[in-house]
Image (cartoon, coloured by chain):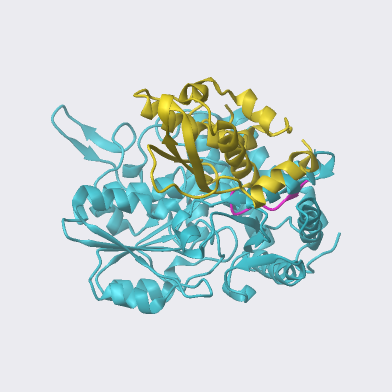
Chain colours: A cyan, B yellow
Amino acid sequence: MLKTEVLDIEKVRADFPILKRTVHGKRLVYLDNANTTQKPKAVIDALVDYYSRHNSNVHRAVYVLAEEATKSYEGARRMAAGFVGATARELVFVRGTTEATNLVRFAWGETNVKKGDLLVSTLMEHHSNIVPWQLLAKRKGATLKFVGLGPDGTLDMGSFEGLLKESPKLVAVTHCSNVLGTINDVAKICANARAAGATTLVDGAQAVPHMPVDIKSFNPDFYAFSGHKMLGPTGIGALVATKELLEEMEPFHGGGEMIKEVFLDHSTWNDVPYKFEAGTVNIADAIGLGAAIDYLEDIGMDKVREHEVRLLDYALHSLAEVKGFHQYGPLDPMKRAGVISFNFADVHPHDLATVLDEEGIAIRSGHHCAQPLMRWLDVSATSRASFHVYNSYDDIEALKAGIKKAGVIFKI
Amino acid sequence: MSSADIYRELILDYYRNPRNFGRLEKFDIDARDTNPLCGDEIEIQIRVGEDRKIEEIKFVGKGCAISQASASMLTELAKGKQLDWVKQVTKEDIFKMLGNPDLGPSRVKCALLGMKVLKTGVYGYLGAHYDDPDGSNPMA
């Protein structure tokens, strides 16, 4: 197997049980990591160990199992917070980035956004960083405007600065595009938005899994990410915000766990972050996320990033040799994450994905939950290959051969 | 499933040279739908003649070879038929029209989008409501 010289790829691949299976009799070539990543055995073992040995509810009972579960769950919170440069009190466990943006929409938006206010998002957002703000704007009579893009798929900072002059209440921007891979200058965006009086929300779903992130270097008001895109389980993610901001906000869901005292006519709220974690929390998957973070830290996020930059560089050069291949997004691998969205001649992405599936190659095809961006690109869909630690140059060569096969079938 | 089996000459031909592609100046029926899973779009317009006959029919759309070829072939089948014929069309008729390719469950939706739009438009014109039995269930 061709190596990127950064990671011992055979050793890494041996950690992921699913990579041993075949699809249609072929080696599984998994290139849909921006959608969800595969799980190392350490994460699967953490889930099995929790349910086999420690299963009980957290924060309530005084027996050994409950104390073990609480210790592991809160340990996972410390790890997840530390992974992005925050502290445990600043991290609310949620189902994923979508729940995080919706939490902000309700718990912050309901009290802070008024009729006539301006909310700002961008043309490169995932639907999870557009639709909650549409719903909030509609309910409050606020306006939602979008920062445009330059021809290379980076944010049009002139358009951004123009919108800041209109004193927006919220600037909601992605750290890294799930389609173009573009890494945004979040330090500049957050600093300028703050100077204009806006609250900032940065969607880290495509950044945290792929590169070192220290939120103290750009100080967003809110930062969100998903566990399943970073080798962890589905159903767990995080919303990070300062303790002061979380304390000012109203609760999101009401119920058990999030309260301090309940009377028939009113209730008082638990301390943050528990104020936002109503009901029985997702204990097992939080612990699984902790195991994923352990695994990533063992490798080192600098190495994860370096590995992906080399794969990107290799892929952008290799795939460009295929006649009819057209990719979207910045060409400089240093300015993007390990994501390549592309089209191939007049073959629709779904048709290409069907041909590739037959070769055991999994890519995403469609609008990637970014329909406004698809309209801006003037395409109905794209194909998307995205990388993680277990991908190799061989995977890119397999993709290239698969695209060529589609060329034969479609008589390109 | 074999992709060489799905993408036979017939489907590629209708994908690249769709028959009845475009819009009508005068129409009595105009229906559009998308597949939320993949964003395929189909819009069908019909001019209804005497005796509820499909006098003219055209479609526009964006999407994969299967969705576009299927919609185009369906407009050819429908042209000149009574509106009631549309009520009788089944999934199996569509698969047969496409040459019975071995489509996986995720691609069946693509093949059936044109039929869904045609039925929605015609049922609406007849004062009825077409209730897609599968809705957006991706595995139905």
Q: In which quadrant will I find the C terminus of chain A?
A: bottom right
Q: Is residue B41 above or below residue A187?
A: above
Given the current orientation, which residue lies at the most extreme front position?
Answer: B50
Q: Position of residue A223 (x, y in %)?
A: 41, 59
Does the magenta-highlighted stretch encompass residue A33? Answer: yes
Q: Nearer the viewer, residue A134 or A129?
A: A134
What secondary structure predominates along the stretch shown in magenta? loop
**Horizontal relation, residue B12 to residue A401: left or right:** left
**Horizontal relation, residue A24 to residue B50: left or right:** right
**Horizontal relation, residue B43 to residue A130: left or right:** right
Residue at 51% x, 53% y: name it.
A80
Given the current orientation, which residue lies at the most extreme bottom position?
Answer: A158
Q: Position of residue A25 (x, y in %)?
A: 85, 39
Task: Magenta stretch: give its range.
Answer: A28-35
Q: Is residue A54 above or below residue B16?
A: above
Q: Position of residue A269 (x, y in %)?
A: 25, 41
Q: Position of residue A152 (x, y in %)?
A: 53, 75
Total numbered badges shown on the rendered structure: 0
Q: In which quadrant will I find the N terminus of chain A?
A: bottom right
Q: Nearer the viewer, residue A133 or A37?
A: A133
**Horizontal relation, residue A147 to residue A11: left or right:** left
Q: Nearer the viewer, residue B110 or B117?
A: B117
Determine the image quadrant of residue B126.
top left
Tell me if residue A16 can be seen: no
Residue at 68% x, 44% y: name it.
A42
Q: Nearer the viewer, residue A229 or A336?
A: A336
Tell me if residue A145 can be seen: yes
